[in-house]
Image (cartoon, rainbow, N blue to C red):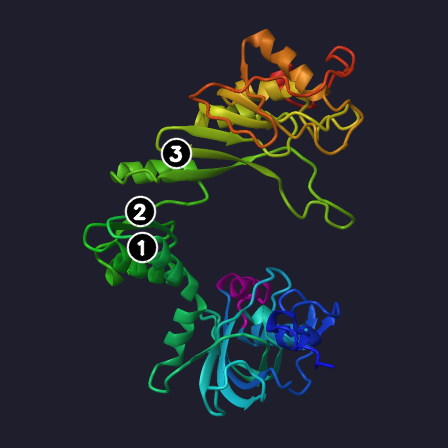
Amino acid sequence: MSARAAAPWYASPAVLGVRRALEPPGALPHIARVLDAAAPILAEEAELAVEALNVDATSYKVIRERCAGDPGRMADCIAAIVRERGKLQNPWTGSGGILAGRITGVGERHWAPGLRPGDRVVPLASLIAIPLELEAVGPLSPSSPQVPVRGRAVVTGRMACARVPDDLPLGVVLTALDVYPAASHARAMAAPGDRVLVLGAGHAGLLAAAAAHEAVGETGRVSALDASEAALARMRAARPATATVLADATDPVGTLAALGAQGLPRADLTLVCTPARHFSGRGPGSTDKTLWCGWAVHGEERRVYYAGDTALQDEFAEIGQRLGPFDLTMIEIGAYDALWPDVHLGPEQAMLAHRLVRGDVLLPLHWGTFDLALHGWTEPIERLLVAASAVAARVATPRPGGMVEPLARIPAERWWPTLPWRSAAEAPIRSTGVSALQS
């Protein structure tokens, strides 16, 4: 009888680190709320004596604010998080950071046999996934997220470790490796002659801009945008060839205006997050934890609007004014009822939303699929076509899996069965508190 084949590494609990998960048991380390950082290392793991943390910038800012900038309280806060969770995962932001330390032990089945005790390394994984114990924290500076510590960490599974030569300043290494994906992503995405816009001029932005310059070469152009003039000044000092733009990226329309004022061309594709009106939450305890949204997509010549899950809202008119007109709108028309008028649009209000955002062709979504309401399966599309005929609007009705090209022939086939349905007069749907409905 042949021996049972060994499980591949991606199916091994020991390699994946799930045996370290205490809460909930069996979870992946980055998902688990609490890890076991005290147990001896397994044959698939490595152990580090930790020297320093580089706390995620957002996480460190929140810790500083909650501790009123007091260094001692900040150190105690970091220690308390690690003591409770067995890892450094900020309970308010969910983020971690990275660490540096020296290898003190390597399991005989660890995937990187080249690691040796005494090697100084930075695990290329977030602190939210690394089992961690701390004996001491600090002294730290409220202005720097690099925190000296003494402790023990466990490198689980297939986590890669970058060896750090002793002649390199550890602070510089931590700063670079904390955001190394930004540089590698920029280098991978950019090509010679491209125009690249980097949003943010912090240390991630600096690395991304440097990598982008290398990728685009002398025939390309790299620009950086930030709301901080000090950050842009550092960018210009580091990379004088970078065009800098002072603007707030959370204001997309203002950002486009700022780019245009400097003569910088528009991006090939611009996505603008737009408001939606829908209940927030998917289950017990999740109310008001997330927000729903839509998207306005601007190409070089055409514009598309996707409304997302939404009821009628006054913001449709502003979306149309600021971001329209749109060659195509994709708007939900089903799952409506008078019992929940502020959750979904319904067919007639979908047509009104289409007109408010200044759409040309309407592609109706969110109908004829799951049974989520009391109306008939085909009622949404039948009522929409009636509403469209009243205002001479164009509606695309492709078969499932079909395609729509607004500039070509619009599919208008009635491919669905003829079934009984209620009219708008028989089953009206009307969202509350919308000025567009007051006339």
Q: Amino acid at mark 2?
A: Val
Q: Which residue is mark 3?
A: 299
Examine the rendered structure and indicate whether residue 164 appears above or below residue 10.
Answer: below
Q: Earlier in the sequence, mark 2 or mark 3?
A: 2
Tell me residue 34's x, y (percent): 70, 71
Mark 3 → mark 1, Cα distance in angstroms? 28 Å
Mark 2 → mark 3, Cα distance in angstroms? 21 Å
Q: Amino acid at mark 3?
A: Gly
Residue 331 placement: quadrant: top right
Q: Which residue is mark 2?
A: 245
Q: Earlier in the sequence, mark 3 or mark 1?
A: 1
Q: How many residues crowd around disc 2 within 10 Å: few (fewer than 14), some, or many (20 or more)?
A: many
Does the magenta-highlighted stretch encompass residue 67?
yes
At x 25% / y 60%, what residue is drawn? Answer: 239
Q: Are marks 3 and 1 in contact (CB under 8 Å)?
A: no
Magenta-drawn segment: 57-70
Q: Nearer the viewer, mark 3 or mark 1?
A: 3
Q: Which residue is mark 1?
A: 232
Mark 2 → mark 1, Cα distance in angstroms? 8 Å
Q: Earlier in the sequence, mark 2 or mark 1?
A: 1
Label 1 secondary element: helix
Does the magenta-highlighted stretch encompass residue 385?
no
At x 64% / y 34%, what residue is drawn? Answer: 309
Tell me residue 380's x, y (percent): 69, 21
Q: Are marks 2 and 1 in contact (CB under 8 Å)?
A: yes
Examine the rendered structure and indicate whether residue 104 appears above or below residue 391.
Answer: below
Q: Nearer the viewer, residue 70 or 270?
A: 270
Which part of the image, by quadrant, shows the C terminus? top right
Q: Amino acid at mark 1?
A: Leu
